[in-house]
Image: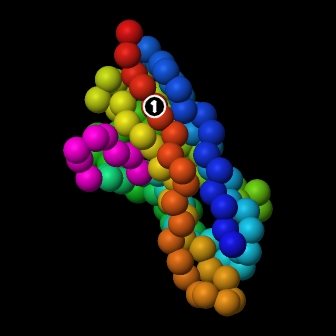
Amino acid sequence: QVHLVESGGGLVQPGGSLRLSCAASGRIFSIGTMGWYRQVPGKARELVADIFSDGRPKYADSVKGRCVIATDTVQKTVVLQMNSLKPEDTAVYYCHVDIYNEATGWDSYWGQGTQVTVSS
């Protein structure tokens, strides 16, 4: 079994910052892409940022220049630093990780979601 535990969401004023963290645990032989998605009611879940196992990051155009994604492969964590937050960043943010174990091969896992609200 694999578990993803997220932390760091909350309420922040426009222009503020938040740091989201996600830790993976369980039967993990290897980790592939790690990233963050977000979803608002009535809309599809969308990519915010992810980072490949070789360290290459990818960002949605809407957050470029405002967010930084980083991973610690030893600790099996992925962190999303979000700055200059806007009301339109309000959403539930989900951690996503591709994990390989010898029994099942590659699988995708999602965290439980953490609410980010940007409001004055």
Look at the image and tell me in which quarter the C terminus lies: top left
The coloring applied to the image is rainbow
Q: Residue at x 61, y 46 (%)?
A: 6
Q: Residue at x 54, y 66 (%)?
A: 109
Percent position of residue 25, x then y? 73, 62
Give the residue type at disc 1. Answer: Val
Asked if residue 13 lies in the magenta stretch, the reply is no
Percent position of residue 91, x then y? 37, 36
Q: Residue furthest left?
A: 42
Q: Residue at x 67, y 77 (%)?
A: 30
Q: Quadrant of residue 55?
A: bottom right
Label 1: how many Cα within 10 Å (few below 14, some 14–19, many 20+)? many
**Position of 87 compared to 8: left or right?**
left
Percent position of residue 29, x then y? 72, 79
Per the rendered image, the range of residues in magenta is 37-44
Residue 65 visible? The answer is no
Q: Main secondary structure of the magenta part?
A: loop
Look at the image and tell me in which quarter the N terminus lies: bottom right
**Position of 28 compared to 22: left or right?**
right
Q: Nearer the viewer, residue 110 or 74?
A: 110
Asked if residue 40 lies in the magenta stretch, the reply is yes
Q: Secondary structure at mark 1?
A: strand
When the figure is inspected, residue 3 is found, relative to residue 49, above or below; the finding is: below
Which residue is denoted by mark 1 in the rendering? Answer: 116
